[in-house]
């Protein structure tokens, strides 16, 4: 694949790489009180140092319900079609990445921070909190919802207000999941009229702020932090539609490749400054490629009928402007950006061997 640094002068190239992110200002999710263990059949939840608490920051890949219900298309049919059978707020037909990771840890998926006043303190205190908002980024994006700095502000407020629950001892087994970046690139492109000349500097700016955010999360007591690498955007249906959903766009994948290379450097730097590894990469890029069985930009044999084609075609969430596939469990993608529940399970299955750092 071509390096992003070799293409810095090719504006058309970067427009194709980045225009997809204008569609990634996705909207959100809401709580599912039932344990995801129903799906994954896992039973544990204790770390050697105590009860696990999971804190989640970022965008729509991990958001489970922070957007206001009246503002989110994911609160409309057909979202939630597979699980729980009605719109739950998640931008999928069912479970998303957060749910599978929580189940891997043996805990319920942490409640959205927006539900704090609706849910018992036991529920919030025992499993952690989800602060993520779909469509947001490290910096402000095109959606008027809390960016990552503000999400961490909410976390800090919680820690300060409930010191007995979030003290050093009870945070000894705490874990954070962080998923951001795509929406920051989308916002840059939109604001700069598709001018790509400063893209390299934008990546450095995004990662510099992300580094500060990660330090801050750790400083608030979180003991392990997993940061998602960017997924292969050239394989998302918004890009593969031009090939009738037959092939990934290799040139578009150069952006996440470049971003992820830089991210690895940041994580290595952070861990070199701590007494033990604290920061870990959750490699969504490789997990997507494995789950889709991509070979030479084309999906190989898999359990998915057409891996690069979404189940929900059209304007998903507008009842008169979409067409739904008959069997979502055979679709990797739910809509043009987001995996289906089965797609996320396939991604999680690819990630699972590398998630031992969480335990």
Image (cartoon, grey):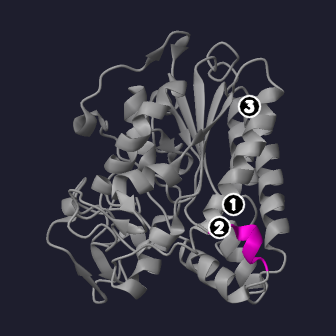
Say above or below: 275 vs 308. Answer: above
**Residue position marked by numbered label 2 in the rendering:** 255
Give the secondary structure at mark 3: helix
Give the secondary structure at mark 2: helix
Say above or below: 262 vs 183. Answer: above
**CA separation, marks 1 and 2?**
5 Å
Between disc 3 and disc 2, whose residue precedes?
Answer: 3
Give the secondary structure at mark 1: helix
Mark 1 neighbour density, 10 Å: few (under 14) some (14–19) many (20 or more): some
Left or right relative to 302: residue 89: right
Position in image of residue 338 (x %, y %):
42, 65
**Residue position marked by numbered label 3 in the rendering:** 218
Which image quadrant is residue 211 in? Answer: top right
Which image quadrant is residue 341 in? Answer: bottom left
**Residue position marked by numbered label 1 in the rendering:** 258
**CA separation, marks 1 and 3?**
26 Å
Q: What stretch of residues is rendered in magenta?
A: 2-8
Q: Residue sitting at 34 percent across and 79 percent down? A: 245
Tell us which disc is closer to us: 1 or 3.
Answer: 1
In this orientation, does residue 146 appear? no
In this orientation, does residue 243 appear? yes
Q: Is residue 209 magenta?
A: no
Location of the N terminus (image quadrant): bottom right
């Amino acid at each position: 694949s071509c390096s992003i640094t070799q293409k810095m002068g090719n504006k058309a190239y970067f427009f194709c790489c980045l225009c997809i992110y204008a569609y990634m200002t996705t909207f959100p999710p809401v709580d599912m009180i039932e344990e995801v263990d129903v799906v994954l059949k896992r039973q544990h939840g204790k770390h050697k140092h105590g009860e696990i608490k999971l804190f989640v920051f970022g965008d729509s890949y991990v958001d489970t319900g922070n957007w206001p219900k009246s503002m989110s298309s994911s609160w409309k049919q057909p979202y939630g079609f597979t699980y729980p059978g009605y719109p739950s707020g998640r931008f999928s037909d069912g479970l998303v990445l957060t749910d599978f990771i929580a189940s891997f840890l043996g805990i319920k998926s942490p409640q959205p921070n927006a539900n704090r006043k609706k849910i018992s303190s036991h529920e919030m205190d025992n499993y952690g909190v989800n602060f993520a908002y779909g469509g947001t980024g490290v910096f402000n994006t095109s959606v008027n919802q809390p960016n990552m700095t503000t999400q961490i502000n909410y976390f800090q407020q919680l820690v300060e207000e409930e010191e007995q629950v979030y003290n050093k001892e009870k945070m000894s087994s705490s874990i954070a999941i962080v998923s951001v970046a795509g929406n920051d690139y989308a916002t840059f492109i939109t604001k700069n009229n598709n001018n790509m000349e400063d893209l390299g500097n934008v990546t450095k700016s995004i990662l510099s702020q992300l580094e500060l955010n990660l330090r801050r999360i750790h400083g608030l007591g979180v003991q392990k932090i997993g940061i998602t690498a960017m997924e292969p955007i050239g394989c998302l249906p918004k890009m593969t539609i031009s090939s009738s959903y037959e092939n990934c766009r290799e040139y578009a994948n150069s952006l996440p490749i470049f971003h992820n290379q830089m991210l690895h450097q940041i994580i290595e730097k952070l861990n070199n400054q701590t007494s033990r590894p604290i920061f870990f990469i959750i490699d969504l890029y490789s997990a997507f490629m494995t789950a889709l069985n991509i070979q030479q930009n084309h999906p190989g044999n898999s359990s998915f009928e057409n891996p690069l084609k979404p189940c929900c075609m059209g304007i998903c969430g507008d009842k008169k402007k979409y067409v739904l596939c008959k069997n979502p469990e055979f679709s990797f993608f739910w809509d043009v950006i987001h995996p289906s529940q089965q797609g996320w399970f396939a991604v999680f299955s690819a990630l699972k061997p590398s998630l031992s750092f969480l335990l």
